[in-house]
Image: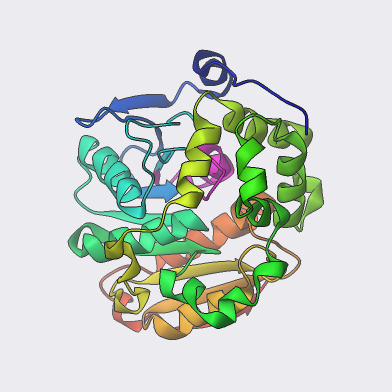
Amino acid sequence: MAYSPDLPTNIVDSRYRSAASQFLLTETGVRIHFRDEGNEKGKPIVLIHGAFSSLHAFEAWSNTLGDQYRIISLDLPGHGLTGAIPGNTYSNDIHLQAVNSVSQHLQLDKFIIGGNSMGGGVSWRYALKYPDRIEAVILIASSGPMSWYNSAKEHQKTAQRPLVTQLLGKNWFRAVAESINPYYLVKWGLASAYQQQQSLTEPVIQRYTDMILRAGTRKAILSRTQARQDTYSQNLDPSSLKQPVLILWGQEDRWIDLSQGRRLASMIANSKLIVYADVGHLPMEEIPNISAKSVRNFLSELNPEKLPHLVKQQAIQ
């Protein structure tokens, strides 16, 4: 893990932006990278990536589901081509504000929201804060309430956490993390996140690495992992969700254990849990076609006749 300087933002941006890339400058000076793709007349789906990731995690879903749905994805503050923001603060509320800024900019009155890992936590929190705007929620290996991680039982699982998350909790590592090359940490971290190793290609590893090396992002990661979550976010409980909720989980998830998916499904009344055999933490990247089909099937059920009869079930695929 040798020293590595930041990559200039313009170089990373030119490398990873697409023809669909747009940048929204908010009133608070945050420049948010987002994409608005797919069927412009279709029902909108807003997709939120997880920690250390970017909107690129949902490119395959956008290509697959875009024939029928309008797919909006964005880079959260401190991630992707949004990167570091003024104030260098990265609480859950900052993430909610980013989602709200993009959805209001695009004049989305009502939409479906979904996310992976940390992005799942952003999704269910957004649905609780703006219930009238959200038609359904898709949680992919989602984080849960902060109280789950503050319990003694959860602390006992610290040793099982991926190496990169353990290191970020060490003061000695944090002292050097802003200047080291993250390539091998990224490679090890993704290898633990992917069960379907054939999906983990060198371009994927390099993309994650370049995004972290983008000027200001390493400092943003350290700020985000060090900061305590705000009180507002700690007090939220996903059991209060009233919208239909689809929960997708890999049976071999080593980042967030499947037991948490079952816990979410048991506490959310109007939910459906699908578990994929031989899949890890990133179903939308590891098995994009199969997981996208699950989303399509779930959303096809959302009509006035079928909505009240959504049945909680678990399926192994």
Q: Is residue 66 above or below residue 304?
A: above
In which quadrant will I find the C terminus? bottom right
Tell me residue 294's x, y (percent).
54, 63
Q: Is residue 3 left or right of residue 114?
A: right
Q: Which of the 4 image quarters holds residue 307?
A: bottom left
Q: Is residue 271 left or right of residue 104?
A: right
Query: At 50% from the left edge and 72% from the top edge, which residue is drawn?
Result: 149
Tell me residue 169's x, y (percent).
60, 55
Query: At 25% from the left edge and 40% from the top edge, which residue is drawn?
Result: 101
The colour scheme is rainbow
Q: Is 95 or 289 nearer to us in this picture?
A: 95
Q: Is residue 152 left or right of residue 44?
A: right
- Say if residue 140 shows up in the picture: yes
Q: Is residue 183 above or below residue 45?
A: above
Q: Is residue 19 above or below residue 110?
A: above
Q: Which of the 4 image quarters holds residue 232?
A: bottom left
Q: Give the magenta part as a residue range.
A: 49-71
Q: Is 139 or 67 nearer to us in this picture?
A: 139
Tell me residue 36's x, y (percent).
38, 34
In which quadrant will I find the N terminus? top right
- Say if residue 314 shows up in the picture: no
Tell me residue 262's x, y (percent).
54, 80
Query: At 21% from the left edge and 59% from the top edge, which residue is drawn?
Result: 130
Query: At 59% from the left edge and 59% from the top edge, which residue is drawn?
Result: 291
